[in-house]
Image (cartoon, helix red, strand yellow):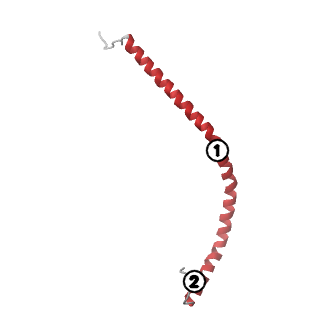
Amino acid sequence: MDIGFHELPDNRRNVCIYGIGLLVALQTILMLACVIILGNVSPEVQTTLVDVNSMLPEMRRSLLDLGQMLPEIQTGMQILKQLCQTNEGCTIQV
């Protein structure tokens, strides 16, 4: 009973083994390069995260202050619009 399996000659088997070995070596080199690049970038990312963590509370306070001032700003804009409507030389368009 023939199962259709034929063993490769020695030279073709060696080429396959060397080819697979070359691909594994190439992948190892590429992975090492990626690790080195990420290792160089990680301190910069850490510094950026520290900066962001210090800025977020300030941004939150600024937004809360702006939210409290918004009704006053809208009232001021309505007053400015009324003043501009009564004055013919007004160039502000609200």
Query: In which quarter of the view is residue 37 placed?
Result: top right
Q: Mark 1 and mark 2: span between their CA atoms?
A: 49 Å
* Whether residue 73 is situated above or below residue 5 in the rendered picture: below
Report the residue at 57% width, 90% height from top: 86
Query: In which quarter of the view is residue 94 placed?
Result: bottom right
Label 1: which residue? 44
Point out the residue furthest to the left here.
Answer: 1
Report the residue at 53% width, 28% height from top: 29
Q: Depth check: 8 or 41 in front?
A: 41
- Mark 1 or mark 2: which is in front? 1
* Whether residue 4 is situated above or below residue 90 in the rendered picture: above
Disc 1 + disc 2, Cβ < 8 Å: no
Task: Check disc 1 and report its element: helix, strand or loop.
Answer: helix
Label 2: which residue? 81
Report the residue at 67% width, 56% height from top: 56
Query: In which quarter of the view is residue 63 placed?
Result: bottom right
Q: Position of residue 88 (x, y in %)?
A: 54, 90
Q: Position of residue 58 (x, y in %)?
A: 69, 59
Amino acid type, callout 1: Glu
Task: Check disc 2 and report its element: helix, strand or loop.
Answer: helix
Report the residue at 37% width, 15% height from top: 12
